Amino acid sequence: MVNCSATELDNIFHALSDTTRRSILRDLAKRERTVGEIAKPYDVSLAAVSKHLKVLERADLISREKRGSFQIVRLNPATLRSAERWLAYYEKFWTRRLDALQDMLEGNEDE
C-alpha cells in the first residue's frame, strides 16, 4: 500500500480511532500473538475482540495466519507507514504554526 486511496485512509483512521484497537496494535508491535492472547487483557468477549480484529484487518493494519487450531495475528507496519506519509505532508503546516506560537509566547512577534 504505497499510495493510499481515500477509502484506504478512511479505513486506517477509522481503525486507529478506537482505544482498544490502538492498544491491540501496540501489543502486536512487540510480537505476533494468537487471538486468545490478544483478547486476554480486555474485559470484553472474544467475539468483541474478533470484531476489532476485523476492523484492523479491513484497514490492512494486521494480517492473520492459521497455524493448526490457532490464528496468529501480526502487525502490518507498511500500512502504518502509508498513514504516516500522509500525515507527514501536513507536518510543515503544524511546524510553521507551532514556531509562530512559540515566537509569540517568547515575545518575538516581529520575526
Image: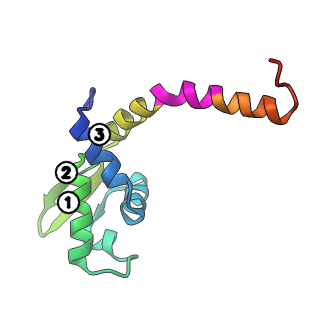
Q: Secondary structure at mark 1?
A: helix
Q: Percent position (x, y) of residue 22?
A: 41, 58
Q: Residue at x 39, y 66 (%)?
A: 20
Q: Which amino acid, mark 1?
A: Lys
Q: Which residue is mark 1?
A: 54
Residue at 64%, 30% in the rendered image? 97
Where's the C terminus, which quadrant? Answer: top right
Label of residue 58 in the image: 2
The verdict on residue 58 being magenta is: no
Amino acid, disc 2 = Arg
Residue 9: assigned label: 3
Direction right: furthest residue: 107
Q: Are marks 2 and 1 in contact (CB under 8 Å)?
A: yes
Q: Which residues are magenta?
A: 88-96
Q: Residue at x 80, y 32 (%)?
A: 104
Instruction: Determine whether 100 is above or below 18 in the image.
Output: above
Viewer-side label of 1, 3: 3
Q: Residue 6, which numbered label?
A: none
